[in-house]
Amino acid sequence: MGMGRPREFDAETALDQAMEVFWRHGYEGATIAQLTEAMGINPPSLYACFGNKEGLLKAALDRYTKLRGVWMDEVVAAPTARDVAERMLMGIADKQTDPANPPGCLLVQGGIACGTGSENVPFELAARRAENEEQLRERFVRAKAEGDLKPSSDPAALARYVSAVSVGMGVMASSGSDREALRQVAIVAVQAVEAQSADRT
Amino acid sequence: MGMGRPREFDAETALDQAMEVFWRHGYEGATIAQLTEAMGINPPSLYACFGNKEGLLKAALDRYTKLRGVWMDEVVAAPTARDVAERMLMGIADKQTDPANPPGCLLVQGGIACGTGSENVPFELAARRAENEEQLRERFVRAKAEGDLKPSSDPAALARYVSAVSVGMGVMASSGSDREALRQVAIVAVQAVEAQSADRT
DNA sequence: CCACATCTGTAGTGAACACTACATATCTGG
DNA sequence: CCAGATATGTAGTGTTCACTACAGATGTGG
């Protein structure tokens, strides 16, 4: 029994191309024709490898969040809650306006609303965003335990807040806001975290 | 020359129904079949009255922003910049989780990304959001002139910030966050505006 | 070199979509 | 009551979509 004809394309490279298409056009806005052209393959290869359009999206999301996870680890490694927020939001301002990628964030741009048959795509994206928020929350819980955040502060609320600002910045970026505008938002946003921080002595 | 057969449906009532469909499913997710059913009319009546799907969206947006404008006037009537931000963000937390409407905000839920032939829809939505931001900006400029905001503050950046938080809350609401979660975000967010406010003497 | 398994390209499939032709119905002005 | 004008309901139109049948190509194990 032979092992069959080998695949002629690299799955990860193809995924990167697919990710960019979803990122730029959203889940429903991206067509199979656009995806296959960007990936340099034909539809049967796509379906053999990823199952269907939603399977391809999930694979692209896995890749996106994996790359993103490395960066998030650096973010939460900042010494204080305030620095975590600053590193996160200023980093997002830069990343979401990086000309190497489509503007905004795949987890937002990918789809807030979808039509019949794709209703679970928005929830899939929300679940990925929730992972980021959870990582922030744990970091802020630690910050509170360390006395970095005030005893009156609410780590979960802070994490939700930073996450909400990130998402808002993503929408702004996708609709044309430039890097400077996003940085201004980040700078203001950090001050709310600063207000929850214990005084330096 | 007669005036023709009169319309059998009320345009504003029909628009309210269409608005809800766009709000819940987004521009591309909403189908003409869903829209006509919700509006209680048939496709030819829709096209005779609104031109096409995009014309219907714009009419629905006009109605949405008109209703919203009344509320925004109340928001900017608050005595201080901090109170403006609080009234705005706490109000949004409530409005975006009002069971009488779909969750989130039509200006966000309507469409962040759209496919071929609808690329201008996201920009149309962004333009409407920009109107809100401009109204906030003018209010914050006044607050700075009145000494309510610190001389070092940047009214435009503050307005962008509040607008960004609003959008982020809209995305959260549409993906299942409850009222309490949004209120927590609002409470934290207001503290950034407070940090830009002059000390009360 | 042959049986078999997997991939690839061509060329479609049925379904859903936005939109409309057309006949009919209901109004106004004369 | 008639002519013109506009609205309505039925029943489509062509297009685009995600997805796939099929035949040929390319590999492995015996």
Image (spheres, coloured by chain):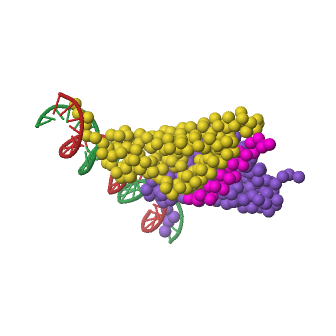
Chain colours: A yellow, B purple, C green, D red
Q: Nearer the viewer, residue A102 or B103?
A: A102
Would you place residue C9 above or below residue A66 in this image?
A: below
Can you give x and y, in whole percent of width and height, for residue B158 in the image?
70, 55
**Magenta includes B149?**
no
Kindly identify the residue that appears in the image at 59 percent across and 58 percent down.
Answer: A179
Q: Quadrant of residue B139?
A: bottom right
- Establish if B12 lies above or below A77: below
- Whether residue B70 appears in this view of the structure is no
Identify which residue is drawn at 26% across, 34% down.
A3
- Which secondary structure class fits the magenta region best? helix
Residue A94 in view: yes
- Tell which of B36 and B200 is nearer to you: B200
Q: Is residue A180 magenta?
A: yes
Q: Is residue A187 left or right of residue D13?
A: right
Q: Is residue C21 left or right of residue B104?
A: left
Q: Name which quarter of the figure residue A152 lies in.
A: top right
Q: Could you say which is closer to the camera, residue B183 or residue C27?
A: B183
* Left or right position of B17 against D9: right
At a point 55% along the width and 52% down the height, the residue shown is A95
Residue found at the far right of this picture:
B201
Residue at the (69%, 45%) spot, across then down? A82
Q: Position of residue D11 (x, y in %)?
A: 34, 49
Instruction: Give the image location of residue B41, x and y in percent.
Output: 49, 50
Task: Identify whether A11 is placed above or below A184.
Answer: above
Judge left or right: residue A65 versus residue C23.
right
Figure disc tally: 0
Query: Horizontal and vertical percent for residue A138?
Result: 64, 35
- In the image, the segment drawn in magenta is A176-201
